[in-house]
Amino acid sequence: MAGLGGTPVLILREGSQRTAGREAQKSNIMAAKAVATAVRTTLGPKGMDKMLVDTLGDVVITNDGVTILKEMDIEHPAAKMMVEIAKTQDDEVGDGTTTAVVLAGELLKKAEELLDQEIHPTVIASGYRAAADKAMGIMKNMAISVSPDDDELLKKIAITAMTGKGSGIARIELADLTVKAVKAIVDEDGTVDVDNITVEKKVGGSITDSQLVYGMVIDKERLHPNMPKKVKDAKIALLNTAIEIEKTEVDAKIEITSPDQLQAFLDQEETMLRDMVNKIVSTGANVVFCQKGIDDLAQHFLAKAGVYTIRRIKKSDMEKLARATGGRIVTSIHDLAESELGRAGLVEEKKIAGDDMTFVVECENPKSVSIILRGGTEHVVDELDRAMEDALRVVGVALEDSLLMPGGGAPEIELALRLREYAATVGGREQLAIEAFAEALEIIPKTLAENAGFDQIDTLVSLRSSHEKGVKTAGLDMENGDPTDMQEKGVVEPMRVKTQAINSAAEAAVMILRIDDVIASKSGGEGGMPGGMPGGMGGMGDMGEDF
């Protein structure tokens, strides 16, 4: 609202609310800190799980940071930015989501202390950016190189990613499956797209019954009971077209005036379908995977010809089948030729946990593989799936970058030490921001210690002491709380996990800090924006206790 000669002029719509200056900053920082508090107890191998119940009553039990934040019904705009950090971290590297969110929350907490000392947000933002840039350089010097042939080290990366995520005693077996699966799909240029690994979840059996299939597993059964259950030396046609009579593009009407005409019409349809099937069979194909529909009559002809057929396969599965078998996806049956067919030693239907599934195996050089995950209950299998996804992604990233970092809080302690030294060379008010950044990094080892039941202060002091003596890889041993060489212990993760987490946390913290005005339009719901927070946030400041 502005004044004009004593008359008020309304600029914002009635019901809109505006929070400015220090109050807006406090509100945003409080919301962001509350999100960080919500996931903080899940960090590390001794982290606790969260049970999330949605409006339909569906239950998710997990300690995966990004899953928790996606399931939470968050309304506050600053809190949503914290969720975006986790999503970005997950998309980029697959692991380290909780680390990124906890770090962003702590950076804002330290920034709030500086704001109370009348240090301008722009100065804090500048110091944070300088500290993040310096941290990248320090980490490059700390990085450990890994060879793509070092299976043992790659397994340790997978085990580190899965620890504490429900994989339990089967971590070693699952890590073995992970490394084999990722190495099978590496492209010639060294890139790794883990989307080429299909993970099928099946309830039943134990975690150790999980298996890797060098080829494709499709959660579908053959189309007709008269089709063969097993096809050896399979020649596979991959069709992105329906084996049906096509409808005309325009509205058309056929007038039939006698039974003979009707019979001729039906005979013609049958002949067209028979010709389609004959065209497929003439190429030598004995297996057909179709992305679209197949007419009942065509199914009969395919069964008669002894062709194993599945229809309505997902586009992503078709692309993986093409990679696994070396075939090409054809969009017209007339273009199908023997040279387009994929090859597999065996295609068969197997029953897994009561469901019929199709296995395409014994491929010559499968660039697409499948993992079947087993577990006692649905919640176990779901959490196992999330752990496996993290492990696959980090092993893929490690193979692409060939650079690792020690885990257990070792990089954060080393960075904090070096950034304090760097801050002394900067001077001015920025120095305080860089020191705050260094202190914020120590939240990771402190949280690891807290979640494992150790004393935070004692742990931090002993870790700092080790690093000051030059042991850069000293991290927290989660069994006894002592500083231990994480590289020797095999607790390692890709460098990209740490660089992405620190960069995204710093960027989000800077963005939230620079907001000094929140203008909220009136929404259809109740509650508006009391105290600069949307109504739906409802007491999020207490989330750490209530969650």
Image (cartoon, grey):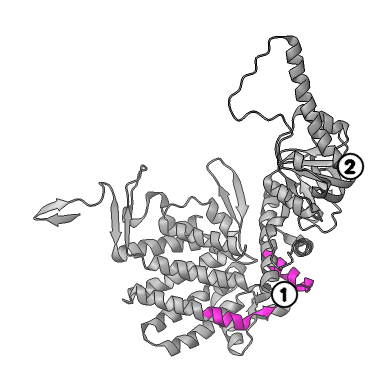
- Image coordinates for residue 524, horizontal then vertical, percent: 36, 42
Could you tell me which secondary element the residue under label 1 belongs to? loop
Give the image quarter of residue 280: top right
- Does residue 84 appear left or right of residue 533 in this picture? right
Which marked residue is nearer to the observer: mark 2 or mark 1?
Answer: 2
Judging depth in this view, the residue of 159 and 199 nearest the camera is 199
Give residue 29's position: percent from left, percent from top.
40, 64
Q: Residues within 10 Å of mark 2 (few under 14, many from 20)?
A: some
Residue hosting label 1: 490
Where disc 2 sits, the SS reads strand
Occupied quadrant, residue 406:
bottom right
In the picture as drawn, the residue positioned furthest to the left comes out as 5
Judge whether 243 appears above or below 117 on screen. Answer: above
Q: In whole angstroms, how far apart are the C-alphas of marks 2 and 1?
A: 44 Å
Q: Nearer the viewer, residue 244 or 65?
A: 244
Label 1 CA crowd tier, 10 Å (few <14, some 14–19, many 20+): some
Q: Residue 230 has which mark?
A: 2
Q: Which residue is rendered at x = 49% and y = 63% of the image?
A: 36
